[in-house]
Amino acid sequence: MIDTGHENLHLQSESGDLSSENTKLRSELAAAQQRLAQLEQKLSFQSQSGLPTHFRLDLELEEFVERFGRRQDDGSANLPGFTVLILQLGSTYGMVRKTLRASISEWILYQTGCRIAAFLSGRDRVFHTREDEFVLLLPGKKGSHLKEFLQKLHTSLAVPHGFTGFSVSVGVTSGASYFPEHGLNRSDLLHHADLAAGAAKDRHKPFVLFRQSIREIAVERMELQNSILKAIEAPALHQLGEQFRLLYQPKLVVSSFDEGKLHISKIGAEALMRWNHPSKGLISPAQFIPIAEESGLIEPLGKWLVYTCASLLEAWTTTGYGDIGLSVNLSPRQFRSSSILQTFESALSSTGSGLNRLTVELTETSLFEDIESTTRILERFAALGLRISVDDFGSGYSSLSHLHRFPLDEIKVDRLFVEHIRTNKHDRVIVGSLVHMAKDLGFDLIVEGVEDAESLAILYDMGCRGYQGFVLSEALSEEEFLRFHDDIVANDMVVQLPLALTHQS
Ligand code: C2E
Ligand code: CA
Ligand code: CA
């Protein structure tokens, strides 16, 4: 009995344990469910805009495809299908995010979400898929309907966001794909709308609708990128020379200009890279440099360029061409790479040639990306004896007066200002003031893209003395360039322009 009593007692205490265990489990489960619900809420809704995220987009786009696909199948409707629209915020948003308080960028996102939502009708959906990206599903909005919708939407999104004491306008670009024309499933529709949005950004257009040709361009770009990878991943630096080569475009400084005769005081050249692709032939740097930049492959290319030019300068010194200066272009990523200084240093020590005949051309926009680090890098370049030139000057937004903080030697006026110098008074005013300011600040000035003698004469009258452009010569092979140099020397440093033009002043 006593035993049984004990047994009972034991059972009682066991059931007591069980029920408290159960209660504990239940509350743990409830807490876990609550956490799960919170997590789901967090994953499903973007915290800043409160809009559904890409998780919801994936689900709902599947549903759209199924629903609209069924209607197409049973022929129940001459439905126009639906549009997938990707809207991306412009670079200003990224700048605001990096430089201003977080609450400001959050407010911009919230406002953008609200402005988009205000334009949606019953069946339209909007998702906030990445920080700077919104995706809209728009049933029935195609062609002129879409155009009208976009006009209103872009106008509303362009209105500046007001804050105390300042306002910020954030541009947007967008790309779209149609169901069923451009894709019958979720991933194709999104991929194609994304390609269209990328094309809009590349072409600086507010909107691009997907077309097969956009896909072809993207595929070609990828192929090109893969072949750059193949071309430069394995071989040692010197083997790059098998596929990449340099051409040299003369850069001349003149002392006078008379009766079509240019009296040359200095002959230099800009090294311009070409890629001799095994199957595609010669490819221009405008095509492959941006790809090499994106993929990081630009760094080995930059090393090859610096070594090639340093040894060329050395070779020229020993063969009697020691007076020729050479310019190289560095892309923003090359310029900011941690290894660039060391590359110059070791090129200098291994070739033994002085770098003071080497000029580094950096674009204006890359200089102003981060003024403090730019100053530091440029000071170290200058300490090595490199000359520094600002390329494409005038195409960015800085003014010459901002340049005084950098140790510069030369500015190159952007081709855009030279192109219409004969007819455009505005361009003449700009170039004229650049000439004066460069003189005051002690920089050499080169005008690039000079294509005819008449433009050169106008530029000469305005005080320009440094020229580069097709009127003098296009980019040449090394042998051609040295012949060009020798001809000038043989002609008592005179170049006769192709037109027998008499200088007016
Ligand atoms: P850039 O530095 O502004 O080089 C001048 C470009 O203008 C060259 O094109 C040149 O052929 C072209 N040009 C020269 N004179 C005239 C003219 O009178 N009229 C016209 N319409 N064009 C003229 P290219 O060789 O195709 O180079 C394009 C750009 O590629 C260069 O612009 C430079 O930004 C970049 N690049 C070239 N080589 C290199 C390199 O080795 N490294 C890096 N990072 N970039 C390079
Ligand atoms: Ca250049
Ligand atoms: Ca340039």
Image: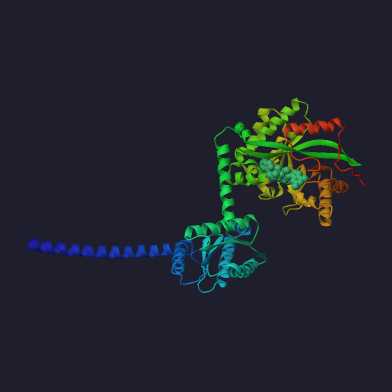
Q: Residue furthest front?
A: 75
Q: Is residue 404 above or below residue 156?
A: above
Q: How many marks?
A: 0
Instruction: Tell me: 204 left or right of 324.
Output: left
Q: Residue at x 56, y 49 (%)?
A: 219
Determine whether, in the image, residue 6 is placed left or right of residue 305. left
Whole-percent x, y for residue 240 in the image: 61, 34
Q: Nearer the viewer, residue 47 or 225?
A: 225
Ligand 1 shows up in which quadrant of the image?
Answer: top right
Q: Position of residue 32 (x, y in %)?
A: 35, 62
Q: What percent of the width, then of the height, locates residue 162?
A: 64, 68
Q: Quadrant of the N terminus?
A: bottom left
Out of 80 and 401, give the one closest to the viewer.
80
Which residue is found at the position 73% from the left and 41% from the top? 388
- Regarding residue 95, the answer to whether it shows in the image is no
Q: Nearer the viewer, residue 221 or 14?
A: 221
Query: At 63% from the left edge and 44% from the top edge, which residue is drawn?
Result: 288
Would you identify the image quadrant in which residue 443 lies? Answer: top right
Find residue 340 and report its image quarter: top right
Check the image and name the residue furthest to the top.
Answer: 318
- Residue 122 visible, this orientation: yes
Left or right relative to 219: residue 66: left
Percent x, y of residue 9:
14, 64
